[in-house]
């Protein structure tokens, strides 16, 4: 097969970038083999990256897609130590590895981008808006960048060479072009064929690197390179007003292009490309001048050139979704969890997004933006899952409502922090803002952890607008420190019920993961909240009973075994036991 210009660029990118991308992929995935797979996929899809920054963007873009969740692993075993790291540095790095293992995928990604890649906070937060960056970093050592660099150094490159990487990238690109099976299985076939991993005797000697070249960002492509779209995009006076608006807020005054502008579905949406591919969304009421629009996106580089998406609340409270994509892109949106009010069965909401000149706009049957995902299938690329930029999101808090929320079972109240985190889980998953839900706290209790401390566990129920009921349970804490506070929150899983279910009578059982007594990994505790005075019996998946003692309707089982708890029975009714692998609110 002749080498096309695009293949030549891809081969060149693979040869020049894989060594410096592999350590970042290792930090993202936590596994040597998964890191290799991730680098191959990032270099084989879309437009070939041209420098380290665009290569990292490609890594993150692929890593955050659904397939890569299987690649999340733990950094385990005695990996070869870099020659320049002292024993104390290695001990610190391995301690950090344990801490990273306790984070979810997006939290881990944020830590790597901020601490290792030195992305600024605004860019990191714009990419991962649901990650609370400051509290997350406060939970980690102050010398995070140093520890990440040492940890990245544990990922050796001696077992790889340029031709092996190029061969794997070509094979993966060819499979994608034929629209056949993609993903880790395809890359694994290359590994199994002996292309990826030479024998130890064939391993070339690794050359230590002394630094990372910094190259200029390439000219934009895809949707960024398209002609301006929308009836407002060609208005020079509007662009001048946008420039003045951005300058007033500390943004750039030069190098701006108005990519899209329109009054659509009752809102005004402007998309501006700034220097170095930075995007700015200006949104607000239909017909508003730039001076009166909200600006979102300072410092946020475009992660995927296939499409860019934004959500805007309308005057009626419903979310407007606008996507500006490369022409020829097929678009759809995951709108969150749907619960059938007649059966309580859960499904994933989906909306097709027809396009005109590559632009799609829709009013969604939702009032909350953070659970929304856009799937963009570009003309020459595999589908990409995008997180739309949320704008104008309504604020909500119990901060003015007192010290906490009244609880049916266990403690008399749930802390404001735990209540809000649990309620946010429901809002994000279902797409309904808290003010559209009938919310009650079904239980709150303090569960001792193996390390000698305790976590607050809280269960919250919400009646959705159509009458269906969902519950969620979570565990965490907020603790004051000399420098402020630290906080942690882990979702334990949720359940769903049909309309007409009385939340006050529902028994909630969920298996929560709590930090292990050895400082690494997790132990499991199944927490139960029932109406006070009601006895509950837990059963495993094979039907074996597990007793749990309740106090004021709250209790927990320390049972840990090979089989998960499956059901909770009370007063002749059977309820599911939620958990990380049985979560009705997963989306």
Image (cartoon, grey):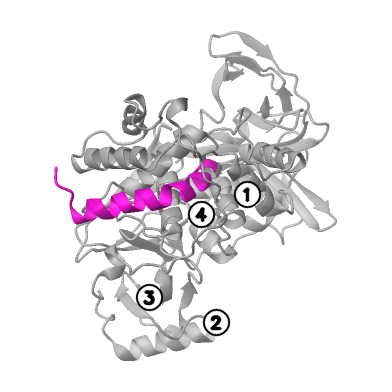
Category of crowding for the residue at label 3, using alpha-carbon neighbours closer than 10 angstroms: few (below 14), some (14–19), many (at least 20): many
Q: Nearer the viewer, mark 1 or mark 2?
A: 1
Residue named by callout 3? 272
Q: Residues within 10 Å of mark 1 (few under 14, many from 20)?
A: many
Q: Which residue is nearer to you in this view: 480 or 106?
A: 106
Q: Earlier in the sequence, mark 3 or mark 1?
A: 1
Secondary structure type for disc 2: loop
Q: In the drawing, what numbered circle is on residue 149?
A: 1
Q: Could you tell me which secondary element the residue under label 4 belongs to?
A: helix
Q: Give how far apart the Cα atoms at labels 4 and 2 are.
A: 36 Å
Question: Alpha carbon of mark 3 to alpha carbon of mark 4: how far?
Answer: 33 Å
Give the mark, 4 or 1, whose residue is nearer the N terminus: 1
Q: Which residue is mark 4?
A: 436
State the image coordinates of residue 288 (x, y, percent, origin top left): 40, 83
Q: Quadrant of residue 103?
A: top right
Disc 1 is placed on an element classified as helix
Residue shown at 31%/32% (left/top)?
Answer: 186
The numbered mark, 3 or 4, whose residue comes first in the sequence reads 3
């Amino acid at each position: 097969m002749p080498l096309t210009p695009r293949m030549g660029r891809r081969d060149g990118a693979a040869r020049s970038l894989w060594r410096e991308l592999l350590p970042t992929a290792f930090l993202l995935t936590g596994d040597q083999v998964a890191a290799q797979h991730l680098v191959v996929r990032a270099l084989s899809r879309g437009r070939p990256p041209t420098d380290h920054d665009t290569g990292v963007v490609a890594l993150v873009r692929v890593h955050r897609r659904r397939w890569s969740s299987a690649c999340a692993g733990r950094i385990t075993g005695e990996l070869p130590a870099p020659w320049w790291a002292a024993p104390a540095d290695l001990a610190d790095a391995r301690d950090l590895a344990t801490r990273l293992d306790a984070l979810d995928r997006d939290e881990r990604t944020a830590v790597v981008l901020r601490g290792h890649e030195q992305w600024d906070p605004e860019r990191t937060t714009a990419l991962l808006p649901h990650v609370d960056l400051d509290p997350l970093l406060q939970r980690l050592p102050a010398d995070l960048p140093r520890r990440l660099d040492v940890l990245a150094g544990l990922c050796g490159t001696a077992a790889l060479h340029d031709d092996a990487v190029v061969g794997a990238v070509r094979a993966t690109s060819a499979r994608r072009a034929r629209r056949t099976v993609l993903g880790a299985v395809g890359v694994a076939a290359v590994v199994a064929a002996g292309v990826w991993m030479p024998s130890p005797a064939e391993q070339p000697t690794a050359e230590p690197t002394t630094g990372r070249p910094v190259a200029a960002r390439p000219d934009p492509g895809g949707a960024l390179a398209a002609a301006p779209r929308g009836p407002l995009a060609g208005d020079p006076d509007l662009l001048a007003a946008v420039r003045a608006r951005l300058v007033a807020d500390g943004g750039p005054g030069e190098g701006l292009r108005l990519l899209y502008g329109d009054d659509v579905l009752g809102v005004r949406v402007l998309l501006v490309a700034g220097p170095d591919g930075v995007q700015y969304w200006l949104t607000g009421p239909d017909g508003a001048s730039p001076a009166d629009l909200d600006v979102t996106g300072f410092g946020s580089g475009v992660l995927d050139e296939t499409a860019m998406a934004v959500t805007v609340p309308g005057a009626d409270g419903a979310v407007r979704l606008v996507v500006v994509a490369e022409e020829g892109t097929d678009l759809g949106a995951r709108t969150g969890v749907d619960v059938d009010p007649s059966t309580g069965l859960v499904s994933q909401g989906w909306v097709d997004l027809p396009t005109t000149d590559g632009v799609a706009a829709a009013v969604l049957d939702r009032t909350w933006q953070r659970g929304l995902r856009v799937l963009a299938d570009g003309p020459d690329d595999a589908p990409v899952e995008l997180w739309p930029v949320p704008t104008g999101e309504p604020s909500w808090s119990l901060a003015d409502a007192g010290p906490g929320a009244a609880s049916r079972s266990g403690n008399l109240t749930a802390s404001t922090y735990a209540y809000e985190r649990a309620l946010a889980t429901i809002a994000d998953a279902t797409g309904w803002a808290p003010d559209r839900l009938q919310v009650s706290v079904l239980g709150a209790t303090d569960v001792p952890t193996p390390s000698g401390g305790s976590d607050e566990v809280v269960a919250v129920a919400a009646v959705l607008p159509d009458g269906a009921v969902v519950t969620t349970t979570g565990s965490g804490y907020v603790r004051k420190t000399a420098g402020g506070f630290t906080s942690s929150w882990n979702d334990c899983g949720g359940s769903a019920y049909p309309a007409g279910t009385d939340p006050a009578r529902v028994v909630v059982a969920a298996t929560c993961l709590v930090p292990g007594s050895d400082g690494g990994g997790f132990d499991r505790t199944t927490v139960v909240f029932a109406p006070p005075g009601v006895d509950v019996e837990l059963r495993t998946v094979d039907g074996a009973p597990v007793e749990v003692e309740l106090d004021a309707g709250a209790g927990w089982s320390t049972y840990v075994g090979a089989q998960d708890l499956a059901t909770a029975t009370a007063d002749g009714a059977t309820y599911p036991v939620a958990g990380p692998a049985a979560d009705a609110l997963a989306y």
